[in-house]
Image: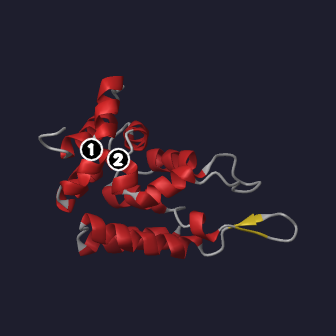
């Protein structure tokens, strides 16, 4: 991991692809060096994240990103969903991050679809409101999420076609 910090992300990708359980030592080492991922080119991030997202065990890969704290460095928007503990209201029985991971896992394993699934509810963190009756709403969360997609697309160096596809899918929720 010290030689090439991308290997921390690659480990999560292998777990998503192969369904392996990471050894505690791997998780500890990746967590210790998580910030080093910022020294890696964004194009390399994108290649590994695309592969992770289409993996048959994508939930395991995303979980590794969260437990190793890579998520906070790569996708602070994802970390915000993980940290969001407020109620989603009477229509959602899961917290935001577990719901998001389930949607990603159930989405078609195509790169734009899985990226869109990852961000489909990301705007909920910023748009939560509670009306006088106590009902929870997330008005405009799809537009807020699309703005987040713009930031992620720039950070990860999405090509224009991928950026537009993901943004459109998120807007259409």
Q: Position of residue 21 (x, y in %)?
A: 36, 25
Q: Residue at x 24, y 51 (%)?
A: 37
Q: Position of residue 166 (x, y in %)?
A: 38, 67
Residue occupied by mark 1? 9
Q: Position of residue 49 (x, y in %)?
A: 29, 51
Q: Residue at x 32, y 56 (%)?
A: 111
Q: Position of residue 73 (x, y in %)?
A: 35, 54
The chosen color scheme is secondary structure
Secondary structure, mark 2, is helix
> Residue most toward the left?
3
Relative to 172, residue 111 above or below: above
Relative to 88, residue 105 above or below: above
Secondary structure, mark 1, is helix
Quadrant of the frame with the N terminus: top left
Q: Is residue 23 visible?
A: no
Q: Are marks 1 and 2 in contact (CB under 8 Å)?
A: yes
Q: Which of 49/75 is in front?
A: 75
Q: Which of 137/160 is in front?
A: 137
Residue occupied by mark 2? 70
Left or right: residue 99 compared with residue 23: right
Q: Which of 139/28 is in front?
A: 28
């Amino acid at each position: 991991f010290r030689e090439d910090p991308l290997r921390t992300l690659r480990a999560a990708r292998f777990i998503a692809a192969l369904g392996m359980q990471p050894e505690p030592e791997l998780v500890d080492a990746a967590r210790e060096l998580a910030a080093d991922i910022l020294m890696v080119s964004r194009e390399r991030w994108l290649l590994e994240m695309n592969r992770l997202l289409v993996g048959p065990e994508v939930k395991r890969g995303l979980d590794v990103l969260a437990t190793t704290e890579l998520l906070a460095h790569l996708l602070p928007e994802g970390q915000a969903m993980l940290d969001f503990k407020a109620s989603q209201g009477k229509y959602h029985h899961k917290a935001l991050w577990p719901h998001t991971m389930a949607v990603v896992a159930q989405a078609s394993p195509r790169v734009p679809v899985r990226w869109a699934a990852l961000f489909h509810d990301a705007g909920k963190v910023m748009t939560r409101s509670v009306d006088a009756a106590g009902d929870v709403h997330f008005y405009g969360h799809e537009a807020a999420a699309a703005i987040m997609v713009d930031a992620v697309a720039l950070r990860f160096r999405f090509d224009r076609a991928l950026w537009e596809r993901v943004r459109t899918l998120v807007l259409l929720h």
